[in-house]
Image (tube, rainbow, N blue to C red):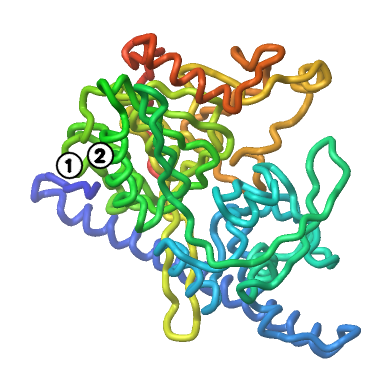
């Protein structure tokens, strides 16, 4: 915030002199920084020229420069990157809700391509690829150490063409998976009636999500007979997507009020986003299912419904991505830059960066073996935002809960298909899905303002 001086006129001369010295110091400092930047750019050009002249084989300088740009952005945080013109076009197509590929959300970790989550009904999902898997080779050629964008390019190709991916999974020998590339038209919202309970699964947040959710809510209203006991909103393994879509989705379950706020390095970057319209089911109990694959926009929805006491959050701790990326076009033929420009906060002022959304009721998807339980306390967190290289720190000091034995997990001999969903339905039918009974979420203090 700009500070206005209210001083007596007699002090004007002294004030002017002080401001003059300060302005000179700032100008000198800025000039020194610019000079340092130019020196580093000269160093880069010198290294590139010497590499081109002396490297053991010739190489494409354009690819080397793009790799350097990506390396610079990746050193900031794991979600900032350069998009060449083809990548930029693909990203625009992907957010529209239809694109070509394998149907898999990936990130980079320690030189490996790591699976955030496969999308339902896609080649990756049908082939059994899971959240937390590492992809190490494509068609027998290693992709370890390759920039993420380059690895993703190799996974793309002509519709109907085959691809072989090597998968590394914890406690399992590496294995190959054969897939066929196809046009991905993800079913972003799936619905069904489970007796007197409605079920809605959102798989991603793109331009089609809100319309699909509205259709799904109407379908649930028609399919459930004898009165709707409650709704299960399934956000498990949802990698996120558009911020705008998460706000619209939350708006279907709350009557006005804040959904999320964002704060960047400048005062002008601070924004609050409110619900845009009245709730469709304002009085129907809601249980939201989350897990380690629930990220970004999915966490915004879960965090808002938790803080607003609108839903009970059930499952396991979410991924913990509490930042927002802006796509900045660089001009014709130059592609774009995806840059982390702000952090986001839940209505109670919480940053979930690295820490994730803690469920009100913790329920595991599978029963842990004795070996799993013995290793759980010593195993490092393997699948979370905080485990990614150069991940932003939580500016409020919140930390992810260490690995532990879940409070509830499938009993011995469980023969059902989805224990977490079964528990959510049971909670709703018992009339115990009361968010007011969940532990209170304390409002966090506003974070310290960042400086350029």
Q: Position of residue 49 (x, y in %)?
A: 75, 87
Q: Horizontal placement of 269 versus 287: left or right?
A: left
Q: Are marks 1 and 2 in contact (CB under 8 Å)?
A: yes
Residue at left 45%, top 67%? 30
Mark 1 → mark 2, Cα distance in angstroms: 6 Å
Q: Position of residue 254 (x, y in %)?
A: 23, 32
Q: Secondary structure at mark 2?
A: helix
**Residue 29 appears in the picture as rendered:** no
Q: Position of residue 81 (x, y in %)?
A: 56, 64
Crowd band around label 2 with a 10 angstrom C-alpha radius: few (<14), some (14–19), many (20+): many
**Residue 27 appears in the picture as rendered:** yes
Residue at left 74%, top 31%? 380
Q: Position of residue 402 (x, y in %)?
A: 65, 23
- Seen from the viewer's position, the closer of residues 328 and 311 is 311
Residue at left 21%, top 47%? 3
Q: Secondary structure at mark 1?
A: loop
List the single residue furthest toward the right: 56
Crowd band around label 1 with a 10 angstrom C-alpha radius: few (<14), some (14–19), many (20+): some
Please determine whether, in this image, residue 273 is positioned above or below residue 305: below
Dot 1 or dot 2, earlier in sequence: 2
Which residue is denoted by mark 1 in the rendering? 277
Question: Which quadrant holds residue 439?
Answer: top left
Which residue is denoted by mark 2 in the rendering? 251
Q: Quadrant of the C terminus?
A: bottom left
Q: Horizontal placement of 119 versus 165: left or right?
A: left
Please determine whether, in this image, residue 40 is positioned above or below residue 135: below
Question: Which quadrant holds residue 221?
Answer: top left
Name the disc covering residue 432, or none.
none
- Seen from the viewer's position, the closer of residues 317 and 287 is 287
Residue at left 59%, top 65%? 101
């Amino acid at each position: 915030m700009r500070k206005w001086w209210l001083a007596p006129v007699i002090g004007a001369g002294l004030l002017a002199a002080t401001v003059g010295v300060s302005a000179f110091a700032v100008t000198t400092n800025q000039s020194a920084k610019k000079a340092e930047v130019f020196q580093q750019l000269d160093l880069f050009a010198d290294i590139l020229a010497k590499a081109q002249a002396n490297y053991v084989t010739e190489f494409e300088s354009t690819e080397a420069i793009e790799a350097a740009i990506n390396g610079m952005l990746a050193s900031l945080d794991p979600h900032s990157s350069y998009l060449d013109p083809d990548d930029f076009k693909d990203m625009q197509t992907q957010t529209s809700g239809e694109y070509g590929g394998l149907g898999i959300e990936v990130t980079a970790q320690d030189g490996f391509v790591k699976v955030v989550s496969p999308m339902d009904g896609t080649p990756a999902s049908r082939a059994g690829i899971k959240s937390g898997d590492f992809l190490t080779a494509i068609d027998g050629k290693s992709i370890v150490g390759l920039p993420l964008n380059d690895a993703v390019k190799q996974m793309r190709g002509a519709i109907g063409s085959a691809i072989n991916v090597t998968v590394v999974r914890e406690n399992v020998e590496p294995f190959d998976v054969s897939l066929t590339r196809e046009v991905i038209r993800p079913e972003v919202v799936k619905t069904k009636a489970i007796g007197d309970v409605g079920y809605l699964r959102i798989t991603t947040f793109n331009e089609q999500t809100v319309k699909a959710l509205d259709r799904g809510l109407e379908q649930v209203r028609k399919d459930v007979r004898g009165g709707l006991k409650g709704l299960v909103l399934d956000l498990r393994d949802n990698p996120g997507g558009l911020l705008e879509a998460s706000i619209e989705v939350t708006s279907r379950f709350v009557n006005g009020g804040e959904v999320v706020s964002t704060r960047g390095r400048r005062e002008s970057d601070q924004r609050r986003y409110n619900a845009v319209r009245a709730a469709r089911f304002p009085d129907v109990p809601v249980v939201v299912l989350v897990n380690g694959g629930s990220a970004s926009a999915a966490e915004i929805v879960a965090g808002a419904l938790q803080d607003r006491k609108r839903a009970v959050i059930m499952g396991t701790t979410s991924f913990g991505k509490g930042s927002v990326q802006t796509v900045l076009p660089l001009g014709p033929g130059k592609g774009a830059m995806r840059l982390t420009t702000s952090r986001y906060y839940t209505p109670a002022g919480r940053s979930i960066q690295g820490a994730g959304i803690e469920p009100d009721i913790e329920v595991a998807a599978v029963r842990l073996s004795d070996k799993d339980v013995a290793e759980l306390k010593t195993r490092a967190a393997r699948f979370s935002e905080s485990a990614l290289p150069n991940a932003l720190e939580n500016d409020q000091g919140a930390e992810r809960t260490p690995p532990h034995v879940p409070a509830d997990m499938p009993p011995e001999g469980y023969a059902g298909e989805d224990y977490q969903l079964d528990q959510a339905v049971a909670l709703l039918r018992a009339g115990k899905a009361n968010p007011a009974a969940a532990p209170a979420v304390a409002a966090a203090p506003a974070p310290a303002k960042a400086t350029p």
